[in-house]
Image (tube, rainbow, N blue to C red):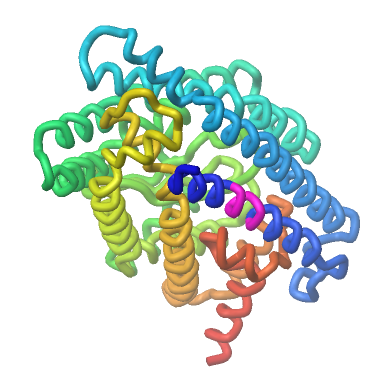
């Protein structure tokens, strides 16, 4: 049997089994006893509801992956990639056009498989627990916009990569890395004003107590605000959040309207101070740098395998091509991507602790941030006691009890 096929099947099955194991451990780790830190915040009924919410979401995720795994394996063994390739080659226009068709058809098939689970998650689970505010019309428009954006942006990137690998020879991976990195950085600047508004409405925060408090905090920290906006997150979900995005004159701080509605001004200032901390402490730059390094490593590995004949044989391909090699390489890259994701999550959790400490120092009220974290956790029905392995593999933020503990220790110290 083809060694690449054995490796790919082992990767797919191994990743699936690991995911199921971790999710089952996470469910078993749920504590029926409310942590003392949340006394007075959760009543018994809502805490049980939070645990049921976790179970339903986890079961759906396991079901989705249990359906996806045999479908992907069958698609590989039955020569599905070759069928799609032949369909793509029937379109005139050359290698790049064929590559865009090949990728587009595969993404379309993947979208069809995932769509029922997305619909169920949004309109059944999120609805059942009082989070969903997405209408059928908004859901459909979001899907259409996402498909169009993926087609335009992804198509441009894919065309550039294919052209460079076709023309630049052995050093093509370096040119691809430079070109894609430049494109990523460009998107970081313009996404806040070109892409995000396609999905949500951003309104400048009105003058008042909240805006004055945020501006005072920012001025005290030497943080130059380019704009404070409210975002109509309530159009899709009752969940709340805040985020910092963009660079330079495109830099924005955005607060969900649901966040403003449910939190007192001191808590909102603490949340925003946390977001300022990410910028002031260089977290955004370091995460971007790490992402670019990981991207370069990926392109290097891609250059070694993109034209490997046994890779095409493993997928029952009758003809080799750069664009098919690019897609098929993704299966071999899964373990590397998992390792990079683990490192990224570890880095992100560390940055969250640092941003919490920054916010506590900036506002002089660590207890206020603790209150904000508790309120958000209760509103979102967050899992207060995740399994350590689940945290290590998947959590970009530390569990809320660990964040609160760190803030308490900082105050005592």
In the rendered view, does 23 fall on the left or right side of 31?
Answer: left
Q: Position of residue 357 (x, y in %)?
A: 47, 75
Q: Residue furthest bottom?
A: 413
Count of marks placed on residues: 0
Camera-nearest residue between 264 and 239: 239
- Kindly give the residue lying farthest to the front in the view shown: 1
Residue 385 can be seen in this image? yes
Residue 226 is a magenta residue: no
Q: Mainly helix, strand or loop, the magenta region?
A: helix
Please state the horizontal and vertical placement of residue 302, each as a whole percent of the image.
Answer: 28, 46
Quarter assignment of residue 258: top right
Q: Quadrant of residue 56?
A: top right
Which residue is pictured at 75% across the width and 58% down the height?
A: 24
Q: Nearer the viewer, residue 167 or 193?
A: 167
Q: Is residue 10 positioned above or below 130 on the image?
A: below
Q: Residue at x 60, y 30 (%)?
A: 74
Q: Nearer the viewer, residue 97 or 382?
A: 97
- Give the image location of residue 136, x and y in percent: 65, 18
Q: The magenta stretch spans which residues?
A: 13-18
Q: Is residue 224 visible?
A: no
Among all residues in the image, which is located at the extreme right? 45
Please state if 373 lies on the left or on the right of 229 as rendered.
Answer: right
Q: Position of residue 13 (x, y in %)?
A: 61, 49
Q: In the figure, residue 120 lies in which quadrant?
A: top right
The answer to whether residue 395 is above or below residue 141 is below
Residue at 55% in and 26% down: 78
Which residue is pictured at 78% across the width and 67% down the height?
A: 29
């Amino acid at each position: 049997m083809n060694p690449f096929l054995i490796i790919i099947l082992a990767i797919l099955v191994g990743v699936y089994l690991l995911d199921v194991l971790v999710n089952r451990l996470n469910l078993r780790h749920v504590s029926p006893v409310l942590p003392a830190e949340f006394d007075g915040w959760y009543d018994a009924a809502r805490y049980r509801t939070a645990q049921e919410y976790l179970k339903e979401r986890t079961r759906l995720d396991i079901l989705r992956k249990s359906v996806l795994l045999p479908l992907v394996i069958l698609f590989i063994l039955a020569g599905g990639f070759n069928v799609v390739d032949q369909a793509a080659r029937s379109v005139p226009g050359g290698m790049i056009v064929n590559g865009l068709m090949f990728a587009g058809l595969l993404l379309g098939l993947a979208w069809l498989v995932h769509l029922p689970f997305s619909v169920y998650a949004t309109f059944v689970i999120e609805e059942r627990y009082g989070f969903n505010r997405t209408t059928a019309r908004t859901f459909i428009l979001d899907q259409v916009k996402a498909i169009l954006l993926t087609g335009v942006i992804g198509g441009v990137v894919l065309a550039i990569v294919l052209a460079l690998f076709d023309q630049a020879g052995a050093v093509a991976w370096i040119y691809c890395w430079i070109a894609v990195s430049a494109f990523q950085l460009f998107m970081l600047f313009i996404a806040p004003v070109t892409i995000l508004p396609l999905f949500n409405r951003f309104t400048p925060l009105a003058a008042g107590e909240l805006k004055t408090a945020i501006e005072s905090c920012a001025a005290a920290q030497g943080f130059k605000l380019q704009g404070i906006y409210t975002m109509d997150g309530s159009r899709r979900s009752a969940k709340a959040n805040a985020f910092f995005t963009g660079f330079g004159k495109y830099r924005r701080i955005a607060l969900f309207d649901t966040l403003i509605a449910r939190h007192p001004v001191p808590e909102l200032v603490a949340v925003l101070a946390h977001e300022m901390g990410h910028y002031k402490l260089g977290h955004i730059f370091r995460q971007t740098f790490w992402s670019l390094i990981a991207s370069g490593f990926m392109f290097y590995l891609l250059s070694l395998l993109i034209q490997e004949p046994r890779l095409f044989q493993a997928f029952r391909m009758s003809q080799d091509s750069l664009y098919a090699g690019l897609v098929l390489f993704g299966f071999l890259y899964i373990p590397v991507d998992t390792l990079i994701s683990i490192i990224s999550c570890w880095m992100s959790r560390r940055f969250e602790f640092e941003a919490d400490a920054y916010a506590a120092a900036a506002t002089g009220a660590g207890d206020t941030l603790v209150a904000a974290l508790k309120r958000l956790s209760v509103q979102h029905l967050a899992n207060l006691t995740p399994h350590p392995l689940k945290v290590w593999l998947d959590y970009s933020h530390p569990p809320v009890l660990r964040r609160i503990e760190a803030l308490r220790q900082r105050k005592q110290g």
